[in-house]
Amino acid sequence: MRRGRRLAIDVGDARIGVASCDPDGILATPVETVPGRDVPAAHRRLRQIVTEYEPIEVLVGLPRSLHGGEGPAAVKVRAFAQDLARGIAPLPVRLVDERMSTVTASQGLRASGVRSKKGRAVIDQVAAVVILQSALEAERVSGDPPGDGVEVVI
């Protein structure tokens, strides 16, 4: 397992959830929800977070269908990740499978008694935590960085 903090991002149309882990990659915690409708402003804020947290990499959740296919949402996330990678290069950006992360986050919030109206404010952060915990576990098991690297195209 590589040592170093990681950031995970759950990209949505309206909001972008951000999570971070400790340098040992043991525990993922929510960071913040970035407004997502103004994409240039979202990228600026994400670059600020990257500067503040100094991660070894940024993991972006890639929405796939249950069968592993990619639809229009995945195309948007790939473009978002490409723009982010350009903005934070040479820091690596990796796309990781995020199937069911929002569903898992919603179930966890409901189970802990958070009402749906209040939960919307944190659901994206919790989804980012789920993405990050899953990626950390995958790296622990395989010994390899999770997901696929985003190649920076200038």
Image: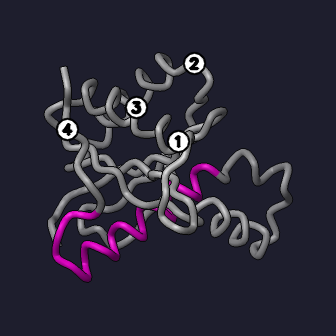
Could you tell me the amino acid type at mark 4?
Answer: Glu
Question: Gap between marks 2 and 3, in whole Å?
Answer: 15 Å
Q: Nearer the viewer, mark 2 or mark 3?
A: 3
Q: In this picture, which residue range is highlighted in magenta?
A: 124-146
The quarter in which the N terminus is drawn is: bottom left
Whichever of callouts 2 and 3 sits on the residue coming sooner in the sequence is 2
Q: Residues within 10 Å of mark 1 (few under 14, many from 20)?
A: many
Relative to 82, is 98 above or below? Answer: below
> Disc 3 versus disc 1: distance between alpha carbons?
11 Å
Magenta highlight: main SS: helix
**Secondary structure state at the residue bearing disc 1:** strand
Q: Position of residue 136 (x, y in %)?
A: 33, 69
Quadrant into which the C terminus falls: top left
The CA span between labels 1 and 4 is 18 Å
Q: CA distance from mark 1 to mark 2?
A: 13 Å
Q: Do callouts 4 and 3 mark residues in contact (Cβ within 8 Å)?
A: no
Of labels 4 and 3, earlier in sequence is 3
Numbered circle sitting on residue 151: 4
Q: Report the residue at 49% width, 44% height from top.
A: 74
Q: Amino acid at mark 2?
A: Asp
Q: Specify which label sits upstream in the sequence, 3 or 1.
A: 1
Query: Given the image, on which type of amino acid does mark 3 rest?
Result: Ala
Q: Is residue 28 magenta?
A: no
Return the disc, 1 or 2, that comes first in the chain's sequence. Answer: 1
Q: Nearest the camera: 24 or 104?
A: 104
Percent of width and height locating residue 127: 57, 57
Provide the residue designation for mark 1.
11
Task: Look at the numbered discs 4 and 2 and tell me whether their residues touch, using CB distance below 8 Å.
Answer: no
Residue wearing tag 2: 38
